[in-house]
Image (cartoon, rainbow, N blue to C red):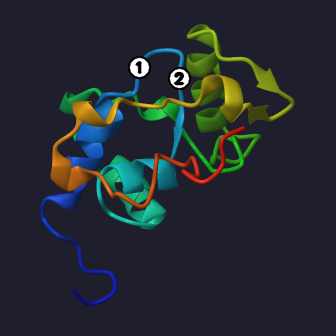
Amino acid sequence: MRPGSIDPTSHQRIWDVISRIPRGKVANYGQIARIAGLGRRARLVGYALHSAPDELQLPWHRVINAQGKISFPRDSDSYRHQRALLEAEGIVFTGERVDFRIWRWLPDTGDFPREYLESDYMFGVNHDQHD
């Protein structure tokens, strides 16, 4: 597959993963890509969110960047809207960040089709580290 080309099922897989993020939890773009079996294609997650039909009613606001921050510019209406939605679900910000140790969604691998999951990753958590 050449750079920039998209497997027709990629967006659907991403939307499926995002639809499962529960209230009061967040996931980052890279985590969603890995769960969907799309490796390190975090940008593809952003493209999929941008092109998602409104009818899907995805909890798009639960997707933040790897630094625990909202990706919209801080002074934008979109930023304020996303932050308000997350805070309404009980998510607490420390400055501009969400603490992944508290708020990260860690799904059960049994909740996803096997082809979605990559064995090298545990949704943003390194298997070799047990803290």
Q: Measuring from the top left, give residue 130's x and y in whole percent.
A: 66, 41
Residue 44: horizontal and vertical position, in percent?
38, 63
Q: Quadrant of the N terminus?
A: bottom left
Q: Looking at the picture, how far across and down is residue 42, in whole percent?
A: 47, 61
Local crowd size for mark 1, using a 10 Å CA cut-off: few (<14), some (14–19), many (≥20): some
In the displayed orientation, state which residue is furthest to the left: 8
Whether residue 69 is visible, yes or no, is yes
Q: Residue furthest right?
A: 95
Measured as percent of width and height from the top left, residue 11 is found at 23, 54
Which SS class for mark 2?
loop
Residue that badge 1 annotates: 22
Q: Residue at x 59, y 36 (%)?
A: 78
Q: Observer-nearest residue: 36 or 4?
A: 36
Say whether marks 2 and 1 touch (CB < 8 Å). Answer: yes
**Would you identify the image quadrant in which residue 9 lies?**
bottom left
The disc labelled 2 sits on which kind of residue? Answer: Lys
Q: Residue at x 39, y 27 (%)?
A: 21
- Identify the mark at residue 25; answer none if there is no mark: 2
Residue at 61% in and 48% down: 65
Gap between marks 2 and 1 measured at Cα: 6 Å
- The dot on residue 81 is none
